Image: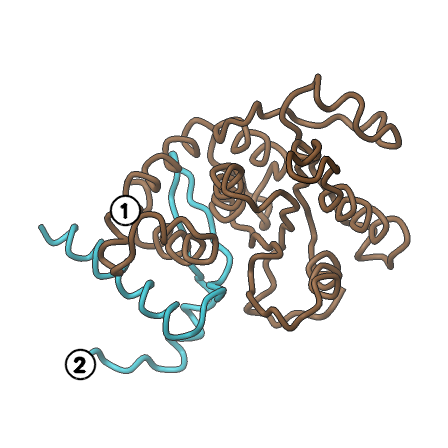
């Protein structure tokens, strides 16, 4: 089981935010927003996360 | 503009365009560019609450938007009814009205007008004479270039990736989308539906930055 994040870690993460890198440029992304029902949104995000985690592990 | 929670404070870019299948590729390219540049794309497809009156939805989206992309390239006569499509010019008018008659924050709104070709544009809205639209010729790469140049910088003022890199990254996302759709037990066609696409896109950007 993943260790529970401390509140200070969560606060730090929210400050750091989400980033992508394109053409060597790091861009801070908007915080995630939901346009699908909660369960469907979570299911898609988890599938994408697992897909790229598996790809990187190969 | 309504007050937003700190977690939702990133500038929003309202997309005013056709929502039919023929325009889908361009809509998705616009949303991609907005999201990759660090902004939040919004449009009337964001929710499917049929009970909410469309005009109320539009008012809220336009009121909350900091920027907008208006595509007026598809206001030709409908083959079925022989009447023009008024939705896009109407929403552009609503946006410009908010900008010109609204409070201080509304007056800071900016917008990009795009159209397919100069020839089609010329006779459309004479009241917009002097507005210099960007022409995309129906090509996603041209739309990416126009939206990127309009946004100019990331919300925090930092520089944006160049258009060549953005176009290549967009192609890479489109190449991966059928595979990540399959991982999520969706068909490629289902993954292209706007709300699915937006969800796949958000997660792709974080999980697969260009290395």
Classify residue B196 as left or right of residue B158: left
Foreground pick, A50 / B136: B136
Chain colored brown: B
Residue located at (80% from left, 23% from top)? B123
Chain colored cyan: A
Classify residue A29 as left or right of residue B15: left
Chain letter of mark 1 equals B
Chain letter of mark 2 equals A
Report helix, strand or loop for mark 2. Answer: loop
Foreground pick, A3 / A48: A48
Residue where numbered disc 2 is placed = A1
Between disc 1 and disc 2, the foreground one is: 1
Report helix, strand or loop for mark 1. Answer: helix
Q: CA distance from mark 1 to mark 2?
A: 31 Å
Residue located at (55% from left, 31% from top)? B143
The quadrant in which the N terminus of chain B is found is bottom right
Alpha-carbon neighbours of circle 2 within 10 Å: few (<14), some, or many (≥20)? few
Residue where numbered disc 1 is placed = B178
Q: How is the image coloured?
A: by chain
Classify residue A27 as left or right of residue B180: right
């Amino acid at each position: 089981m993943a260790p529970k994040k401390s509140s200070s870690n969560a606060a730090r993460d929210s400050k750091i935010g989400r980033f992508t890198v394109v053409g060597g440029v790091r861009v801070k992304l908007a915080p995630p927003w939901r346009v699908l029902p909660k369960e469907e949104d979570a299911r898609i995000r988890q599938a994408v996360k697992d897909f790229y985690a598996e790809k990187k592990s190969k | 503009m309504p007050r937003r929670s700190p977690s939702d404070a990133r500038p929003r870019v309202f997309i005013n365009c056709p929502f039919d299948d023929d325009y889908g590729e361009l809509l998705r390219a616009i949303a991609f560019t907005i999201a990759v540049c660090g902004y939040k794309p919004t449009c009337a497809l964001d929710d499917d609450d049929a009970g909410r009156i469309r005009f109320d939805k539009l008012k809220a989206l336009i009121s909350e938007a900091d920027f907008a992309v208006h595509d007026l390239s598809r206001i030709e006569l409908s083959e079925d009814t022989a009447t023009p499509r008024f939705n896009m010019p109407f929403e552009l008018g609503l946006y410009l009205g908010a900008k010109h008659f609204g409070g201080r924050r509304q007056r800071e709104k900016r917008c990009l007008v795009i159209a397919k070709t100069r020839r089609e544009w010329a006779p459309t809205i004479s009241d917009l004479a002097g507005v210099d639209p960007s022409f995309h010729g129906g090509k996603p790469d041209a739309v990416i270039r126009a939206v990127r140049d309009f946004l100019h910088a990331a919300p925090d003022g930092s520089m944006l990736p160049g258009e060549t890199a953005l176009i290549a990254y967009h192609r890479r996302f489109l190449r991966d989308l059928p595979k990540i759709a399959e991982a999520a037990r969706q068909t490629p066609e289902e993954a292209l539906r706007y709300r699915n696409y937006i969800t796949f896109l958000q997660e792709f950007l974080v999980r697969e930055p260009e290395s």
